[in-house]
Image (cartoon, helix red, strand yellow):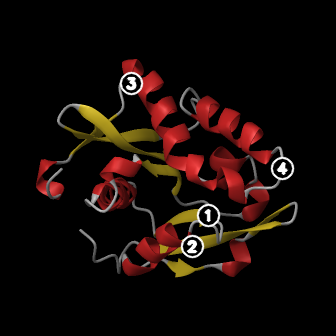
Amino acid sequence: MGGSSQIRVRVAAPGDREAIQKLLVEAYEEYEHLLPEGRWEEYREELRESAADDRPLARIVAEYDGEIVGAVQLYMSAKEAYGLPELQIDTPIIRYLSVLPKARGKGVATELIKESVRRSRKLGASALHLHTTDIMASAISLYERLGFERAPEKDIQSGPTLVKSYRLPIKEASIL
């Protein structure tokens, strides 16, 4: 795989669903042993179901040589993303950012985030949000490099796990 100029970002087509499901499971599988016992099976099913969910504003994929190697889902708010209107996030949220292990380090995730920022800007949004956990350290490092800042007031406590909130102010977003 080469640089980001060879990565094609597009809206997912209905026929991409199976490839996205496979991608999501393969991309998140590395966390299986870090999750509490029994949680991976639940999470794997949640990942698969998300590929068919009609709540995202957009499901965006990244291709390389005609193969889907990355994906992200863009939601309009916390209500659509998590069913949690009480979070009071009424700006776009990205979820399920995923890149196949063989395609990591090539700029795929950055291109998917850039497209999410472009779409958020077109909507007139002031910020783009996401949530993640400490086990996803390399993803957090990427988010911080791209200008996302912690938004602890929007964190989610999920059982024993703190799901940390990050926000990218759209006006200051220099990743485009």
Q: Residues within 10 Å of mark 3 (few under 14, many from 20)?
A: few
Q: Is residue 10 above or below residue 159?
A: above
Q: CA distance from mark 3 to mark 1?
A: 25 Å
Q: Is residue 99 above or below residue 60?
A: below
The residue lying at 79 percent from left, 60 percent from top is 86
Residue at 37% across / 41% down in the picture?
60
Badge 3 vs badge 1, beta-carbon distance below 8 Å? no
- Alpha-carbon span between mark 4 and mark 2: 27 Å
Q: 138 or 84, which is in the foreground?
A: 138
Real-space Cα distance between discs 2 and 3? 28 Å
Q: Earlier in the sequence, mark 3 or mark 1?
A: 3
Residue 27 visible in the current orientation: yes
Q: Kindly indicate the quadrant of the structure image that contains residue 59.
A: top left
Dot 3 corresponds to which residue? 16
Q: Which residue is mark 4?
A: 37
Q: Give yes or no for contact between labels 1 and 2 (Cβ–Cβ under 8 Å).
A: yes
The reply to whether residue 76 is visible in this rendering is no
Q: Residue at x 61, y 38 (%)?
A: 47
